Image (cartoon, grey):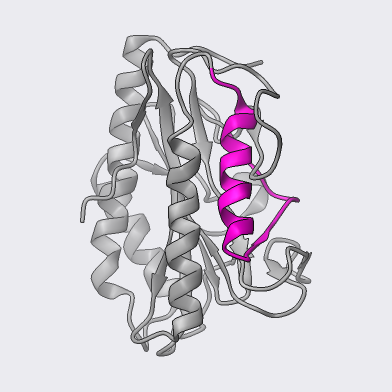
Amino acid sequence: MITIKSEKEIELMRHAGYLVSLTHQYLKPFIKPGITTKELDELAEEFIRAHDGVPTCKGYEGFPASLCTSINDEVVHGIPSNRKLKNGDIITIDMVIGYHGYQGDAAWTYAVGTVNEQKKYLMEHTEKSLYEGIKMVKSGAHIGDISHAIEEYATNHHLGVVKELVGHGIGTEMHESPDVPNYGHPGTGPRLKEGMIICIEPMLNLGSRYVGILDDNWTIVTEDGKPSAHYEHTVLVTKDGYEILTPRLD
């Protein structure tokens, strides 16, 4: 069921989203060669709890960490470990933070040290595709309008659109209705209404769109081993447009 949030609920989710943004900003200086993804996870959990938040991913369906840390060809759901980041890597950090029972969710891909031009291209245009989708958000529009805008931008820039993974509604639960695919046709899917809150999150590959899953049953990787990027915002539908609840603080 798609829910419409009250003003009180929106305010709680606005704060949850701000905590997500604040935690991303806090982690940025630590994302450099030599640090382990487990160390990043520990830093994040300590920071989240110190700010009256709850790391929702930890324990979710058995997931063991506060962050998803996905490196290079890992698309989503990478598990923090003793793996050290290397110069030239890209890493997606995806986090969900609960605040007084309501959730905020955002993923951003970061360069580790100096990355090559292909990875820069992938990051730039994956992030831009996110904003192409967000531009479509307003009361009365359709989910398919968002989906089509992302797919069209990605296709025009020769990037593979992962179809097995989609955005979603969000509220007291991390994942709520509706699904928000990164491909589709304008004018299709549920109609957006003022007070709905959704997560829009293109996951684009430098090569083909096809993915597989590792033996840990969490980490999704590209089939061809080429890099993937992932950007996500939590977005409130307003009467005339939208509000991003997880703003970039940089």
**Relative side of 153 to 250, left or right:** right
Q: Nearer the viewer, residue 123 or 8?
A: 123
Residue at x 50%, y 40% (from the top left corner): 133
- The percent position of residue 30, horizontal first and vertical second, equals 28, 74
- The mark tally for this picture is 0
Q: Is residue 52 above or below residue 84?
A: above
Identify which residue is drawn at 48% across, 65% down: 92
User: Which quadrant: the N terminus?
Assistant: top right
Q: Which range of residues does the magenta coloring cover?
A: 141-168
In magenta stretch: residue 152: yes
Which residue is found at the position 59% from the left and 31% from the top?
Answer: 145
Q: Is residue 32 above or below residue 209?
A: below
Question: Could you tell whether 19 is left or right of 198 in the image?
Answer: left
Residue 50 visible in the current orientation? yes
103 or 162: nearer the viewer: 162
- Residue depicted at 55% across the width and 35% down the height: 174
Q: Position of residue 227 (x, y in %)?
A: 59, 75
Residue 192 % position (x, y): 54, 18
Q: Is residue 234 within the magenta segment?
A: no
Residue 139, above or below 149 = above
Q: From the image, which quarter does the C terminus lie in?
A: bottom left
Residue at the limit of the structure toward the front, as seen here: 156
Q: Is residue 66 visible?
A: no
Residue 150 placed where, x, y %? 57, 46
- Residue 187 lies left or right of residue 241; in this view the side is right
Give the quarter of the image for residue 179: top right
